Amino acid sequence: MQQSMSERKKRRIKFIVVILIILVITVVTGIILWSVHIRQLRNEMNDFLVYSVINTEQGNYDAALSDAGDALILAQRLRDDEAIGDIEDHIVLIETIIRGNAQFDAGDYNTALNTFLFASDHAKKFQDLNTDLIDEKIVTTEMFILFYSLIDHADNIIDVLVYMPESLMYEDALLLCEEALSFYEDAMSVADALSYTAGVRTAVSGIEEVQRRIIEIKHNEAMNLFIYGDQLYNDGHYAQSIEYFEDSLEIFIELDEPQLIFALTNRVNLSKRRVAEEEAAAAIPPETEVPDDTEEQSGSSEESVPESNYEHNQRISFDLRTLIDDQNRRPANQIRMGTRDGLNEGWYNGCGWVAVYNALIILDDPKHPAEIVHYFEMSGGTVLGGLFGTYPHSIESYLNSLGFNVNHTLFPQLSLNIDDVIKASRVSILAYAHTSAAHYATVEYREDIDKFIVYNDSFARTRSAETGLRNIVNTGAAIDSIAAFINESSDILFSFSLIAVE
């Protein structure tokens, strides 16, 4: 019996040992398997983090964010607080860059720059992270900010030239143009370095606008000098007129305007001849002075030109109810104004008096061309004795003398909405420079057809034919917009006068 109990005890002990061995093996196996699992999870986490870093360095931010999210999930399963913190920092970096990209794409470059700078500073936590792409984004954003800053500076200068032209002296206006040109050129260089095609186009457009304004400013200054010199000449101040004519000539030579160069060269020579005549007359001894009757004869000869033209013009018959739409045809081309043989007839220099003649018919106060021309000649209203037609201020004075309320604006494109002014007037006279010379045209707005009718203007007839509007009216050319007519016609440079009769 004792032997039997001893055997049972041995078997029980053996069983317990086996069980213990099995438990130990199970625990060890479990520990080994768990360790393998943990190692696998950590390897997967590290792999996701490596992928995220690579995608971040390559600019694949959506993929980088997805990989970082997967790495964070594994870190949370591993309860690895240090890894969780690092991955969360990495996610913040990616989200910051994505936010900066969105701001950049929206054109909010200043905010984008601050965002990228924050990302760059935050990236310093990751010693092994290549931040070249972030640094490149910062440089690119700074260049875009510089580009638009240069464009804004240039545009602001152009605004001054557009809205405050009267407040600027000629030299100051040119200096502003040169400054704007410099800004646009610098902006174009920046845009070119960025391969920013739209920016290059913007800068080039600005450069072309400044160059056009420089030409316009110089042309206006030359014309003002021309007009003032002509006024001095007509007043007998020949020596003073030479200075203005020569200054005007210098500008027109620079602008390469042959017709005006020819006219001014002749005017300078004529002024110098007048000065020489005065000096010669002053040098004649008292006993050999020219007799008074000779001076009177000379004066009467000069005074006879307007009277001769008046007598000639009165003999030409006009139907004072019929508008003139082509000054090259009879009877308009027979009217004489000025003293230049062959160039004092309506076909050459008549657009000014024709514009007034047409305007007065529309105003129901017609006048024979002889009366209109005589006023211009007797009041000093002709340019270079009629060679270049009529001064705008003389047209204004004549209409005022007839009792009309007149608003006269020089270079109206710079300060007015031309269409609105003409719509509000009974009739208007528009003067503009084109590639060959200058021209006056009468313009009225017809509310019944919602068109502007331009009389005696070949450019307007061409424009009307191009748009299929020519047959709307019997006389004149119908166009949709005078402002567009001036701005978009390739042969027209700019408008220099708008005389509106209320």
Image: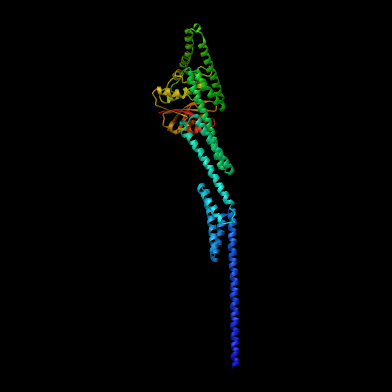
- Give 466 or 159, whichever is nearer the viewer: 159
Q: Where residue 187 sits in the image (x, y, percent)?
A: 55, 40
Taking the spot 52% from the left edge, 20% from the top edge, the residue there is 242
Q: Where residue 475 sits in the image (x, y, percent)?
A: 47, 27
- Give 388 or 193, whichever is nearer the viewer: 193
Of all residues shown, which one is farthest toward the left?
403
- Image quarter (top left, top right, bottom left or bottom right) of the N terminus: bottom right
Q: Where residue 123 sits in the image (x, y, percent)?
A: 55, 54
Does residue 322 appear anywhere in the picture?
no
Q: Quadrant of residue 356?
A: top left
- Give 80 or 65, whichever is nearer the viewer: 80
Of all residues shown, which one is farthest toward the top?
287
Classify 341 as above or below 15. above
Does residue 89 appear anywhere in the picture?
yes
Classify 23 as above or below 260. below
Taking the spot 52% from the left edge, 18% from the top edge, the residue there is 271
Q: Where residue 26 sits in the image (x, y, percent)?
A: 59, 76
- Give 243 or 424, whichever is nearer the viewer: 243
